[in-house]
């Protein structure tokens, strides 16, 4: 099977807000979408084959980001919405898996942290020297603008801080908590554990976390094809297979063929009619 059945596309239309009647206009609606889905991307379009703020703002399947995003009203609206949701701090935001900017519902923070996070005891081995410098400053100051952080860390080149911040976001160590445009554009950075202390303290085994991510992914997609989970998140095939088999054993999903999993019918219908 290489193409999804139309019933699954319609299921995703509703879940991903790919319908005009369901498109998002406010921060509250955007946060509700994140909470329902578990996670979504930010300013990406249909080519990523995952839900995003931009797709939700457009309210259609074929949403494609234009080259000149500054003059596109939908791209601008999604950008403003992203900034507002970041500042409200009700959902997690950061540049995470495969360098994608993602929003996470609070319940998914321990899941992502268990898979991609780095415990404090392993920071010296798994984080670069520059990343550790940034962490040291933020653990003292708690929050800082980009330029001030670069100065405090002693970086003479902007790319040094950019790479360190990107690394720390992927490892779920730092998050942006505010975007400022005046007097100049900058992010205000803080520690993930400072903004989401309860969620960051929760520990879970990697196997359990991969299973829960597979559950979340199947819940938002309705059906997954061969290799989907591994391609999206970089898991080994055996790891994805184990997680999906566990969901089948639970009765959460059904296996239609090699690597093809489908939400059990009553769950699929229940989620489709719940909106």
Image (spheres, helix red, strand yellow):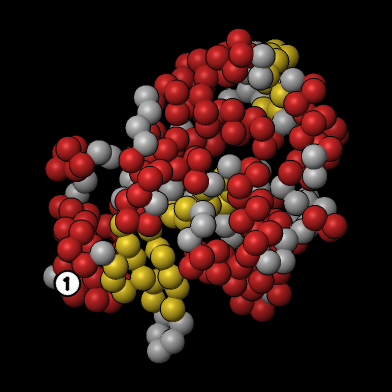
Report the quarter where the C terminus lies. top right
Q: Is residue 88 left or right of residue 136?
A: right
- Residue 139 image position (x, y, % from top left): 20, 59
Total tally of numbered discs in the picture: 1
Q: Image height check: is 261 above or below 186?
A: above
Residue at the front extreme of this rendering = 198
Residue 195: x, y in percent? 38, 57
Answer with the quarter of the image where residue 260 lies: top right
Q: Position of residue 148 (x, y in %)?
A: 24, 76
Query: Mark 1: which secondary structure?
Result: helix
Residue for badge 1: 152
User: Residue drawn 85% across and 34% down?
Assistant: 6
Residue 140 relative to residue 33: left or right: left
Which one is nearer the viewer's eye here, 2 or 205? 205
Q: Is residue 151 above or below residue 219?
A: below
Write the residue at 61% across / 50% down: 34
The answer to which of 65 and 274 lies nearer the viewer is 274
Instruction: Answer few, some or many: residues within 10 Å of disc 1's Cα (few below 14, many 20 plus, some between 14 and 19).
Output: some
Residue at horizontal 44 percent and vertical 55 percent from the top? 94
Task: Say whether residue 62 is left or right of residue 198.
Answer: right
């Amino acid at each position: 099977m290489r193409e999804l059945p139309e019933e699954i596309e319609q299921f995703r239309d509703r879940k991903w807000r790919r319908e005009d009647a369901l498109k998002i206009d406010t921060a509250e609606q955007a946060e509700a979408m994140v909470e329902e889905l578990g996670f979504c991307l930010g300013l990406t379009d249909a080519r990523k084959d995952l839900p995003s703020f931009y797709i939700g703002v457009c309210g259609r399947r074929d949403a494609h980001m234009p080259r000149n995003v500054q003059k596109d009203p939908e791209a601008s609206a999604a950008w403003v919405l992203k900034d507002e949701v970041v500042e409200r701090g009700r959902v997690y935001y950061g540049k995470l898996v495969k360098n994608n900017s993602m929003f996470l519902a609070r319940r998914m923070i321990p899941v992502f942290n268990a898979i991609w996070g780095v415990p404090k005891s392993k920071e010296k081995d798994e984080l670069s020297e520059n990343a550790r410098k940034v962490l040291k400053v933020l653990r003292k100051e708690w929050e800082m603008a980009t330029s001030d952080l670069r100065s405090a860390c002693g970086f003479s080149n902007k790319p040094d801080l950019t790479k360190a911040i990107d690394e720390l976001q992927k490892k779920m160590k730092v998050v942006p908590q505010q975007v400022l445009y005046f007097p100049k554009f900058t992010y205000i950075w803080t520690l993930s554990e400072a903004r989401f202390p309860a969620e960051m303290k929760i520990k879970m085994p990697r196997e359990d976390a991969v299973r829960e991510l597979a559950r979340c992914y199947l819940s938002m997609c309705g059906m997954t094809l061969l290799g989907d989970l591994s391609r999206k998140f970089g898991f080994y095939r055996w790891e994805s297979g184990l997680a999906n088999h566990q969901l089948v054993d639970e009765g959460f999903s059904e296996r239609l063929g090699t690597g093809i999993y489908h939400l059990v019918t009553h769950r699929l219908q229940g989620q489709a009619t719940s909106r």
